[in-house]
Image (cartoon, rainbow, N blue to C red):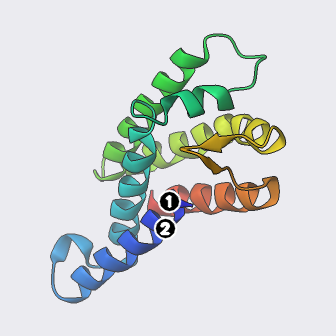
Amino acid sequence: MAPFIALIVSFVLFRVLGLFGLTPFDGWQPSLQAAAAVMLLLTASAHWGKRRADLIRMVPPSFRQPGLIVTLTGLLEIAGAVGLLFPATSRAASWCLAALLIVMFPANVHAARKKLTIAGSPVPGLPIRTLLQLVFIAAVLLAG
């Protein structure tokens, strides 16, 4: 839920800044681009912190080298977050991020079915996780 909260709160914050005349956030799309970048940087940070082992456990056993997969997906999230912030790359970044979120979804299914935890808290159930994933996909596509 933290990524969803980060997305919503940062979007509102950036939008308010835009309404108060901060030009880079003048409009819903620039605010969404920045908010999606914040969300992605937050999620990427878990790929190397104390939550790393939890993310590795989320990778379905049919995939080899789960540690490498977690590292690569974290790097791709960072690259996508940066890519969203530049007009020349935002569209490509948004499509790549949507694809990444789709490709990572089996890990969320696995985590929900196995009732895994992240930092001691249970992962959301599959219906909620699916809805959140759709929101994140929509957010990155609209940001591009």
Of helix, strand and loop, which one carries label 1? helix
Mark 2 belongs to which amino acid? Ile
> Outermost residue, bottom direction?
20
Looking at the image, residue 85 lies above or below residue 69: below
Image quarter of the N terminus: bottom right
Numbered disc 2: secondary structure = helix
Point 29% across, 74% down: residue: 14
Residue 79 can be seen, yes or no? yes
Say which residue appears at 43% left-offset and 64% top-offset. 6
Is 34 placed left or right of 112 in the picture?
Answer: left
Q: How many marks?
A: 2
The one nearer the camera, 26 or 78, is 78
The quarter holding residue 125 reads bottom right
Residue at x-position 72% and y-position 62%: 131
Please state which amino acid type lies under the numbered disc 1: Ala
Q: Is residue 7 above or below residue 72?
A: below
Residue located beneath label 1 in the image: 2
Instruction: Give residue 13's quadrant in the image.
Output: bottom left
Residue situated furthest top in the rendering? 64
Kindly identify which numbered label has been placed on residue 5. 2
Image position, residue 124 (x, y; %) = 71, 55
Which quadrant: the C terminus? bottom left
Do the residues bearing badges 2 and 1 touch, measured as CB atoms within 8 Å? Answer: yes
At horizontal 49% and vertical 36% (from top left) the residue drawn is 51
Residue 29 drawn above or below residue 88: below
Q: Viewed as shown, does residue 22 lie left or right of 63?
A: left
Q: Is residue 89 visible?
A: no
Which label belongs to residue 29? none
Q: Is residue 121 left or right of residue 27?
A: right
